[in-house]
Amino acid sequence: MRKAEIFAGRILRWFDKHGRHDLPWQHPRGAYRVLVAEVMLQQTQVATVVPYFLRFVEKFTSLRALAAAPLDDVLAAWSGLGYYSRARNLHRAAQICVENHHGALPRDFDALAALPGIGRSTAGAILAQAHGLRFPILDGNVKRVLARHHGLRGWPGASAVQKKLWAHAEAHTPHARVADYTQAIMDLGATVCTRAKPRCADCPLQRTCVAYREDATAQLPERKPARTLPTRQTVMLLLRDRSGRILLERRPPTGVWAQLWSLPEAADADSAQRHFDASVELRALPSFTHTFSHYHLEVAPLTGIVAATRGVADTPDRRWLLLREAAALGLPAPVRKLIASLSEES
């Protein structure tokens, strides 16, 4: 028996006893449900994804329903999961499928991988799990399992290391039970071969794992070279009118929190005050820091009552909304928390 077959066989036997068999996208395991799950799981753990997934597929029951929905509704359903480009890409991918693929996800690998936000690993996961087709995957959990098992040095994001990982992923993918194997190797990475304190005693690959043999599980896979994140500052304005409505504005189509509804911003307190007459008294709320993947954002919130709203919000991308109306929109997590603090004060 080839080493690759032994590898897959051990994982599948482990999966039959210890794997996750009751995830909501497994029942049924159709292409649309797998797509939504895989996109949500790209940068988020299963425990967090499950309730979002259930609400999302209940609201958008099919690829066509998702394609027809307003983007605001999609972002609202995604609100709190973060990395909102995933939601925008998923929405656009659904529209492309309706326009070019008769309302279904293509079963052709190249066509599927070309859809916004999908790429090689997600396309492989969809085709393997929904259709049982033999395509490898390489998400974060799988990278960790393969890097440790084969003793691969270097950061997995580096092109040379990634090329080796893909070669191993391809070699180990079996010709039978592909859907189960795909879930199994992800489960193994998520529950046994974890980033910290891996449970090597419970691992079916222990006997052939280079990292275990060389006591290198803490070093592999190697981390991305550290870099210092820059810090930026902004002032967020929680402005209310006499009716208790709050002012929100839609963010630009590109950049951070693209197309989400958010609070107006200013460079500093003085420039914020200059937007309004002297009768608007702005009061400082506790500042906080929100960290993105590429920088820290220091937020200084100011709140105040605007007596005259005429001219303050007179475009489709600026609205006065009741707090419950604002809560129903797609909002960045820190903005949602700020608005919730107003609800508590009311």
Image: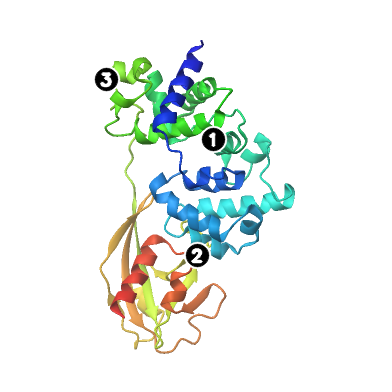
Q: Secondary structure at mark 2?
A: loop
Report the amino acid beneath label 1. Ser
Ranked by sequence position, the earlier of labels 2 and 1 is 1
**Residue highlighted by disc 2:** 251
Residue flagged by tag 3: what amino acid is it? Answer: Asp
Amino acid type, callout 2: Arg
Residue visible at 46% across and 56% down?
256
Mark 3 to mark 2 CA distance (whole Å): 49 Å
Q: Specify the quadrant of the image occupied by residue 134.
A: top right
**Residue 41 percent location from the top left of the image:** 46, 44
Give the quarter of the figure containing the C terminus. Answer: bottom left
- Give the residue number, with chain letter if any, for mark 1: 121
Q: Residue at x 58, y 29 (%)?
A: 135
Q: Nearer the viewer, residue 80 or 186?
A: 186
Q: Earlier in the sequence, mark 3 or mark 2?
A: 3
Q: Residue at x 42, y 34 (%)?
A: 19
> In the image, 44: left or right of 75?
left
The residue carrying pointer 1 sits among few (fewer than 14), some (14 to 19) or many (20 or more) residues within 10 Å by Cα, namely some
According to the picture, the residue beneath numbered tag 3 turns out to be 215
Rendered view: 236 above or below 150:
below
Whether residue 153 is visible, yes or no, is: no
Q: Is residue 59 above or below residue 215?
A: below
In the picture, residue 14 is in which quadrant? top left
Which is nearer the eye, 95 or 246?
A: 95
Q: Secondary structure at mark 1?
A: helix
The reply, left or right, for residue 236 in relation to residue 133 is left
Secondary structure under badge 3? loop
